[in-house]
Amino acid sequence: MTSIEWINECSSAFRLMLATSWLAPDGRRPEQKEAIRRACSAGPDWDEYLCLVDRHRIPAMSWASLKCVPDLCLQENVVRELRRRSDACRMQSMLRLHLLAGVLRRFNRASIPVMPLKGPLLSIEMYGDPGLRQSKDLDILVRREHVAAAQACLEETGWSRCEKSSILTQRQLEFNMRHEHHTDYVHARTDCELELHWRTVWESPEEAGDHMDRSLTAEWQGCTYQAMDRIDLTLYLCNHGSNHAWFRAKWLGDLARIHAAGSVDWMAALTRARQSGAERPLLLCLRLLEDAYRIPAPSAARNSIRALPPVLIGKSIRELITLAEPCTRGSLASLLDRFRNARFSRRLWPARSLWESIAAVALCPADIKLLCLPDRLFWLYLPLRPFLWIWRRVRDFLRESRVRAGGGGL
Amino acid sequence: MITNSYRAYGLSFVADLVCPELPPDPHSGRDADVTIQSFTKALRPLCGNEDYRFEVLPGIFRLDVSGVARYCVREARTIVVEPLNQSLPAKVRLFLLGSTMGALLYQRGLLPLHGCAIETPFGTMIFVGAQGSGKSTLAAEFQRRGYRILSDDICAVQQIPAGFQVLPALPHLRLCEDAYDRVGRPEGTRFDVDKFIVPLGERYCPHPARLTAVHVLSDHKSSEPRFEFLCGLDRVRLLFENLYRPQFLKGQQTQAQLTRMVGSIAQQAAVVSVNRRRDAARTSDLIRFLEDNWSQNFAPAAPMENM
């Protein structure tokens, strides 16, 4: 599918959502304004637009970018709804920022190097405004050897684990550390969620350590933290978006801003991506930026972009334009999604070893949370894997049915 | 006649003079709440030799600023301005948007506190204190950190069924040179009459927000700041002391209503004494200290509907 085809087939509400999913740097502001004006003049369905704003998590961004076009005539109810969403997003971000400051201070006291990922600090770094990017939670990365100390610090500062780890044996914990990449926390007073990462899904713990080694020590609100090197940040955002098949435009919007501002050396990024076997996520991102925002890819990358497997582009476009949230799809659909995602991941990171791919299917950290076996029977998780998988599916299906029945009764 | 439409303090204004300090009204076609008219030789001078003379009568407020302008606020709906002897328009507007606006708010039953108001995840926090106590510097530091500002100088508080809300005022901060230097001379600033005007841009909160607490700033010598909830009549006393131009309240038709409102605010919102050493370098520490206290003492605010 060419870029002209898929963009033209989308509704004007979707095109407006794309045009307002980022805040262009000054040099590209006229093009963004023109794209917004064009989409608005096509008479978008505003209800659809508001749904898309929610779906793509861009309430403050869309309102800020619409406000940059002063001569737009927006309906009063649309303005009210956008402003309400934007204000709620801003307040949420300020609260997260405050909680993050508390976490950083505590980690500083314990001398644990910590790297905030995405979230309000990225918003400050990219736009100078913590409230523009909506984040579901806080994400922080620590070195694997600091995870236990980091967990203790979090628990001291009002965060509690979403799943209690006390029931896990030593072997299970080790397994978890090797095959999981983060632990979930929730803040008791504010219900804010935090993910404590020791690696990312697409990286080995060693590669996560490399991020730390290359990072710069930055200061914010009197706290120090490790800021990702500019190229690492770009690759991280490309990998993160690609890992989720770019189902939120806000991830593309961030990279559109980075690209349009000329703040990253794409060839250096491509070289590093090749070294780590993550070239395709970067190329996929460049292709989508060209399609969605008309930001041309660097000429040296064009041939590689053309050689991308069509399945990567096709799935990303489908995910981007679909109206439904991935989590709201039924259990059968999500089962099919899993197979498609596995195929997508293999194509996305072809350098990933076969053993890693097999391990991802053969071993599942969710199994040890479902059934706690003593360490001497740990090997049983492997043969039990299909049964435990069916058990989880049946449990999820029953839970879904109960929720649906409850909803029908109301 | 050319009219200009503006919106501030929850009120719509039409004016025959240009007020770039006021935010434009997005719904300028509607009937305005307040009309601002500029005339020559319209108002009689007030008696007295002082440079700044005023008179409060039921439904009428007059202000005479020597060499600048005469102002009159009538029945909470009309402001008449008479500039004197080729006075600077910016100086005429300074007293129009300051003292005269304060009197208008009193007439309309809105309580003007002398301070700044910040929108936070825990609701709106007002900071009051004596002149030079660092309110605007604090507001500038808050906005630098990403908070949105509702007002600097005059905080108009309105009673609503669910409690109290602060109405958005002007979309800029007015900083003295000292404070302007301290906050790193922000871009886009201009000098106006006696202060530096720092536009708030996206950091201006253009809609009312629910009041959570009024903080009374004061100095003390200890290096550690203190955050104390006040109780009893202290709260009422401090609120009265920190009204905007409190001398304008006496004689207003709304005097009894506003006096009751002060009592209600003291009961329903928190009144906090914030003691700290006036040390410019410690403003960011003070903000961190405040944030910690807010998160310990106040619940995150639910967003207000229908703003």
Image (cartoon, rainbow, N blue to C red):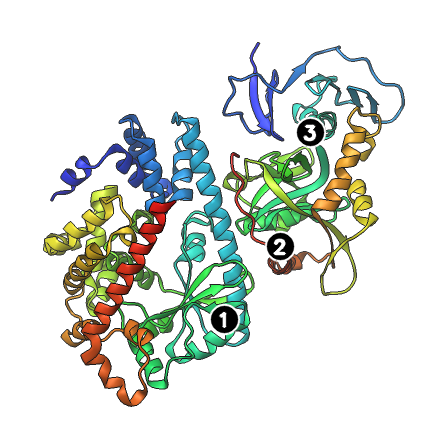
Classed neighbour count for the residue bearing mark 2: other residues with Cα under 10 Å, few (<14), some (14–19), many (≥20): some
Q: Name the residue under label 2.
A: B298
In the displayed structure image, the side of residue A246 where residue B253 appears, left or right: right
- Residue under the image location 73 percent in, 39 percent down: B114
Question: Residue A243, how many percent across, how many down?
Answer: 25, 60
Element marked by disc 1: helix
Q: Determine which residue is flagged by label 1.
A: A154
Is residue A286 rendered to the left or right of residue B110? left
**Frontmost residue, A143 versus A165:** A165
* Residue under pointer 3: B94
Q: Are marks 1 and 2 in one subunit? A: no
Report the chain holding disc 2. Answer: B
Residue at x-position 37% and y-position 77%? A144
> Tag 1: residue type?
Leu
Q: Which residue is drawn at 75% across and 45% down?
A: B266
Name which residue type carries label 3.
Leu
**Residue B56 position in % (x across, y down):** 82, 23
Check contact, mark 1 vs mark 2: CB within 8 A: no
Q: How far apart are marks 1 and 3 (CA)?
A: 50 Å
Image coordinates of residue A209 in percent, x first then y, are 34, 75
Q: Which of marks 2 and 3 is nearer the N terminus?
A: 3
